[in-house]
Image (spheres, grey):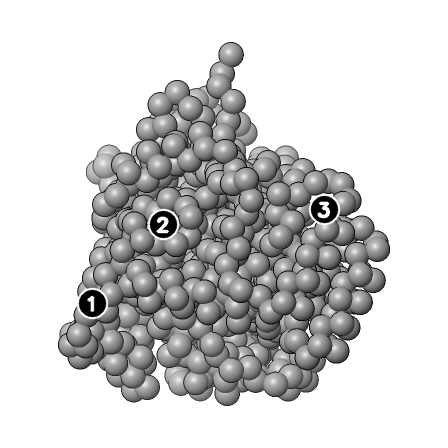
Amino acid sequence: MPPPTSNVVLTGNPNCGKTTVFNALTGLRAKVGNYAGVTVERKEGRLRHAGEREVTLLDLPGTYSLSPRSLDEQVARDVLLHHLADDVPTPQLVIIVVDASNLERNLFYATQVIELGYPALLVLNMMDVAAELGRTVDHAALSRALGVPVVPLVASKGEGMPQLRQAILDGLDQPAPAAPKSFGTLPAPFAKELAAVEAALQSHPPVRSTTHSESLLILSDESFLPANVQYYPAALTAAVATARQRLDTAGINWRTAAIEARYLRIGDVSHTVVSEATDSGPTWSDRLDSILTHKIWGLVIFVALMALMFQSIFTFAEYPMTWLEQAVGWLGNQAEGALPAGELTDLLVRGVIGGVGAVVVFLPQICMLFLFISLLEDTGYMSRAAFLMDRLMSKVGLHGKSFIPMLSSFACAIPGIMATRTIESAKDRLATILIAPLMSCSARLPVYTVLIAACLPDEKLGGIIGVRGLAMLGMYLLGTVAAMGMAWVFKKTLLKGQTPMLIMELPSYKRPVLSVTLRHMWDRSKLFLRRAGTVILGINILLWFLATHPKSAELTSDFAAKRTAIAQTTPDGVTDTDAIEKYRNDRLAELASDEQGAQLRDSYAGVLGRFIEPVIAPLGFDWKIGIGIVASFAAREVFVSTMSVVYNVGQTDTGDEAVTTGLVRVLQAQRRADQVTPVYTPRTAFALMVFYVFALQCVSTVVIVWRETGTWRWPLFQWMYMAVLAWVMAFAASHLARVLGWPD
């Protein structure tokens, strides 16, 4: 019989290194999901090196107190108060992670959690940062003051991890405190009313171990009881109202009395256990911040980092992309050679290997993008970027805290939209949700890459800045500027409100842990691969069917006769056998291309493309591009695999031989009806990329907006305004390119 599982909860303030501690304890093997009924991420993993014990760690969202201001913080509070009892078992141990360099601020939440009465363990993390600031923390004295074990730690370097694991195992064997500890001396009238509320709460089932702490919240937090009335007896509301009225009569501020008492006690503890070195001037972190958050140099550095990121996406990913492309081509050839000719082979080579492979080859670029974003987050620069952008964000009615979800949307709009839960203002949160998809996500990256590679020269301006990297940066900047502009429109019209003041913590700079950064990069990249193996695969199979059916017996017979005629044709005056063979193969290749085009035009996909062609023709797009636009509503990167299927990439039938070629070269070879004018020109690429900057071509984003807003009204509005904006801006881009003299 397997041993019973012990449940441990990990909690703490944001930016205290809690996630690093969790990753170190679980070895980055976490199970990620959502809490029941909400979109807040739930992350849990198994404690490594726990011997025969089964210990599950649950990483709660970061929060500053048990009085939440966002959905993330509310979930953390609800887990600790048993409000999610059906979804989360009662913790047998609570690990509280605090930042040793900001101990006094962190102890407010830590003491609230200790008062809940669970067996608790305090992790004093980031001891190295405290030392750099000249602060020494006496962890033994802190343990005596708080009444719980304290483990000093430097999680980023693995220092103290064996001691922490042992402390967790020891803590699981300890009983809960007989009486929860209380921090702070409350005014006598407040303590009397608190005791009455506590008695009323304790007299109603279920019996709670968290009664004292809950009573404090019920009495002093105006928003707590109305939001959680389903968990408490109905008579409690009247009792609390009466208690508050008596405190008002006694001249006691019941909203702040407990907070003031707690901070007085925390101040005493902090002054006792923390020793400050003589001030030696600005720290290394302060000097770095003076540059990175400078109103001029900070912006220059930020733009330079973004330019470096996008240029690196092309430079560093070039070779692995080439290897993947060759591997996909080899696999297609092997499959075609091993299987008999027929529809099943055509489906496997064109629909599955060719279609999915056309997207998978962009995995190195996706990995590079996620690597850069992970580094920005792990080093602490992301918060500096938000601070830096606050001045610009305030001009459009938002504040810097909205920039973090927007920057996260560079990777994917879905986590970016979910990150808006940290924004306190409902109007600001909704405005950020509505503009987040305008930030160019990783799904757009394959679209940009293939169009830039097919239509723009591989040149450098001044021998330094690559034209292709600059074009990529331009698309990302365009999306960012558009997001700012739409935020200003929404804040002036639908979502009018005061521009909030930015109050946020700048965490200490951290040395990124390579294993953690690479793991984050891979976890996010796996989502891209999973979509390639599910959504994109399914769409490509459907698209292959739509592009190859219905079969026309008349068309097949006509082209078969033409092939027979070519096989018997000898060019005038040519007697060399090799020259004749080459002539016939060239004609057969042209005929195969004509047959594929005729078949596609009369197929179901061709009918759909020609149906929407009048709408997109003013943008410079033909009906084949229209097929890609429609198909990519499921996911933007589907456009690439759709074009691969539409243009028959990976197979050009020339008798017994299959010639593998890349999508870029196939796009460059496409011609319009006059057989001279290229389809894919810089003008076409510009307009099409601009269209994808603005269009909400992602059904997953639509669904997550519905889940976050609780209504279909906002996602439908978002899809429509972005569709109109995409058409108008692509039209403007196409005509601007013509004015600039770009070729049609």
Instruction: Say if residue 38 shows up in the picture.
Output: yes
Mark seen at residue 143 = 2
Q: Are marks 1 and 3 in contact (CB under 8 Å)?
A: no
State whether residue 46 is above or below residue 179.
above
- Point out the frontmost of discs 1 and 3: 3
**Picture quadrant of residue 239:** bottom right
Disc nearer the start of the sequence (2/1): 1
State whether residue 541 is above or below residue 623.
above
Secondary structure beneath label 3: helix
Q: How far apart are the alpha carbons under marks 2 and 1?
A: 21 Å
Q: Extreme top residue here?
A: 1
Along the line of sight, the residue nearer the viewer: 648 or 204: 204
x 24%, y 65%: residue: 275
- Point out the frontmost of discs 2 and 1: 2
**Picture quadrant of residue 650:** top left
Residue 612 at x, y = what percent?
66, 62
Q: How many marks?
A: 3
Along the line of sight, the residue nearer the viewer: 129 or 304: 129
Residue 623 relative to residue 677: left or right: right
- Amino acid carrying label 3: it is Gln
Q: Residues within 10 Å of mark 2 (few under 14, many from 20)?
A: some
Residue identified by numbered label 1: 134
x 65%, y 40%: residue: 85
Residue 99 at x, y = what percent?
35, 59
Instruction: Say if residue 355 shows up in the picture.
Output: no
Residue identified by numbered label 3: 202
